[in-house]
Amino acid sequence: MTGRLILASASPRRTDLLAQIGIIPDRVIPADIDETPLNDELPRQLAARLAESKARAVANSHESAYVLGADTVVACGRRILPKAATETEARTCLKLLSGQKHRVFGGICLIVPDGSTVSRLVMTIVQFKRLSKGEITGYIDSGEWEGKAGAYAIQGLAASFIKRINGSYSNVVGLSLYETATLLNGKGFYTEEHQ
C-alpha cells in the first residue's frame, strides 16, 4: 500500500534526511504551534509533545494522509537549550556545551490515515570538545547556528567540535532515519523504491 505523506515541519534538514532514504513527502506543511516549554516540562517530554502537536495540527486538515511530525530538543541536564535566535543565545549555548556531554532528544510522531498515532522518542548523547573563545566567535560569525536547537549543526562546521557521539547521528541532524523508516513501514507506508 502506498499513501500520501505530509511532513509537518519547516526544517529543510528533515526533508533532506528523508530523501537520503528514498522518501519524498508529497507535501511539506510547517505546523504553526507554540513551542514554549511548559512549566517543569522535561526535555524528553517537550520533544515528544511538540512532535505530536505538529503532526496533529497538520493532520486535522489532511485526514487521508500519513502525517509525520518531528521535533529536536537539546538538553544539558534538565536545562532545555533554545533554538538560537540571537548571537547572545548562541554564545550562551556554545559555552554550556563546551567540554561537556549533552543529550539530543528527537520526538517522532506519525498519524496514519485511519487516525491512529504512533510515536517514538530517540536520545543521542553528544560530547563536545572544550571550545576556545576563538572557536566560539568563529562559529557565531558563520551564522550556521541560527534557528538550530542548541545553536549548532552537527552536519556543518560544528562537526569539528564533536569528540564522541553515542546513538543516532541523523537524530542530531533532525530526524532519526531508522526510527522513522520503522514507523512508516510498520504502518503500511511504502515508497516505490522500497517495494
Image (cartoon, rainbow, N blue to C red):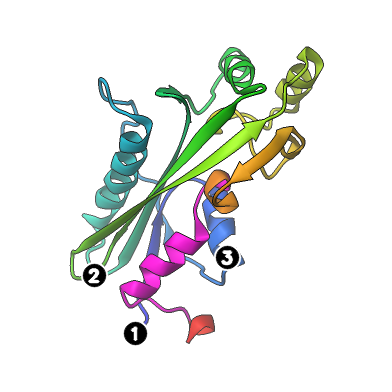
Q: Earlier in the sequence, mark 2 or mark 1?
A: 1
The residue under label 3 is 19
Few, some or many C-alpha atoms within 10 Å of disc 1 (few <14, some 14-19, many ≥20)? few
Badge 2 amino acid: Pro
Q: Secondary structure at mark 3?
A: helix
How far is mark 2 from mark 1, CA to CA? 12 Å
Task: Give the Cα distance between marks 3 and 1.
Answer: 19 Å
Question: Residue 113: which disc?
Answer: 2
Q: Nearer the viewer, residue 104 or 27?
A: 104
- Upstream in sequence: badge 3 or badge 1: 1
The residue where tag 1 is placed is 1
Asked whether, in this view, residue 143 is left or right of residue 25, the answer is right
Look at label 1 and name its amino acid.
Met
CB atoms of marks 3 and 1 within 8 Å: no
Judge left or right: residue 69 versus residue 192: left
User: Residues in magenta?
Assistant: 173-191
- Looking at the rendered structure, the kind of residue marked 3 is Ala
Residue 67 visible, this angle: yes
Task: Give the structural element (helix, strand or loop) at label 2.
Answer: loop
